[in-house]
Image: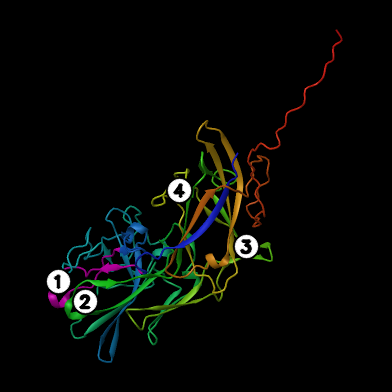
Amino acid sequence: MRKIFIRAVALLALTGCSSDELVNNQGAGGTESQTPIAFSVNKRNITRADITSLEANKHYNFGIWAFKTSDNDKVMVMGNYLVGYSDGAGKGYDKSASTTWNSTSGTDTDHMSPWFYEKLGTAEYLNEDATKGYTKSQTDFMSANENQYLRYWDLAYNNTVFYAYAPYHSQGVTFDTTTNTINVAPSANTAAYDDPTLHEFIYAATSVKNADMKDVKLHFKHLGAQVKLNFCEDIPGYKVKIIDVTDAGSGIQATPATLAAGAYTKAKYYTSCGAAINMSSVTAPTATISHTDAATTEDNLVFQIPEDTVPAKVTTGEQQYVWSPTIYYAVPQPTGSSTGFTFHVSYQLIAEDNGEVIKVHDARVFVPADVVDWKPNTRYVYAFKFTTNSTGTTDPNVNIDVTDPTVPTKSNVYPIIFDGATIEDYSTDEKNI
């Protein structure tokens, strides 16, 4: 059997735009001087080429502070308004009280949209029918305001400035009108798998000319990072099939740890953080991260095995990978953090000539702290390649401890080789004749 090795390489997804884009269209009909402000949203992912709608990423709301301005005059128009989405068939919010709702966004000036804020205040939003959308008992999705009225463009003012964030929070997100800063408590910015509805905090700001009464475009940035895994293999004569580390569903485990003087020690990483997002420059908001009173854990990260469990072969052309379906929305870690992760991966070797199957249990590799120093608005892709050497074992009776961060110093998977072949001398059988 060949020696098998699993190697990890971290790639930052820097190919393209570093911000998201939301395009917000104004709402319903009316005279030109009384055009309501409403919203229609599309989301641009971290990479410029990958564009999906906000609702397709499970964001069904965002929050808005808006101020109309003229010379030195500044008047609040919206104070942490909840802007909600409805597909008209029970996803999102009950749209029956809105006069601006439409199943799709129209032109820049028709003022109809599947996004709306009218009648979404706590005193007005009384939906108890889950088939129409969120119910009033789902408090995580409810407004901080008793009432939310339809707002109109005021042509007596020059501009309206919008400060936006998602997902919406009735508590834990506040706006400082003196410094134009959105303050985010750790409770409103927590890490998660696969659930941007309550996580994946994003923010934006823009100034709009009131007289135009056209689309408001918001360029959103991520406050946190995104973490993904992919795999390929380069083992001549074998296919590699990734399997659960222990029991079914145990996935691919990552144990937080530090490495110093050759010793691995379990460690903590942050699962929440606060932030002060200064939006004085609407074209370039800046976020200052704080870990005061933020939550930490020593729990493993757990990634599902790829749906296509056989990694692609290394080729001379563009490398192809299989991806874990798990996406981890991480909060930024402190600068200079010493916490890395030991990944635990188990897999099968499948011989391409005769189909022989050999299981390799709990191969480990350590990804150091400087490779997991998750920063805002950055996608981290950890690319694992299976090749010839492994810290796993083929012993089926091995005691697998996915909380142990220690990586063996030598390979535990050995090839079958032939060495020192000799020929024994003939025995002598003397015969007297």
| Main secondary structure type of the part rendered in magenta | loop
Q: Is residue 296 magenta?
A: no
In the shown orientation, is residue 214 left or right of residue 50? left
Q: What residue type is labelled 2?
A: Tyr
Q: Is mark 4 on a helix, strand or loop?
A: loop
Q: Is residue 273 above or below residue 59?
A: below
Q: Which amino acid does label 4 sit on?
A: Val
Q: In which quarter of the image is the N terminus?
A: top right
Whether residue 92 can be seen here: no
Per the model, the C-alpha gap separating discs 2 and 1 is 10 Å
Circle 1 or circle 4, nearest the eye:
4
Dot 1 corresponds to which residue? 30
Dot 2 corresponds to which residue? 152
* Span shown in magenta: 19-42
Circle 4 or circle 2, nearest the eye:
4
Chain-order first, disc 4 or disc 3: 3
> Outermost residue, top direction?
433
Residue 423 spot, x, y in % from top left? 73, 28
Determine whether label 3 and label 2 are within 8 Å by CB: no
Per the model, the C-alpha gap separating discs 4 and 3 is 30 Å
- For residue 133, the mark is none
> Outermost residue, left direction?
31
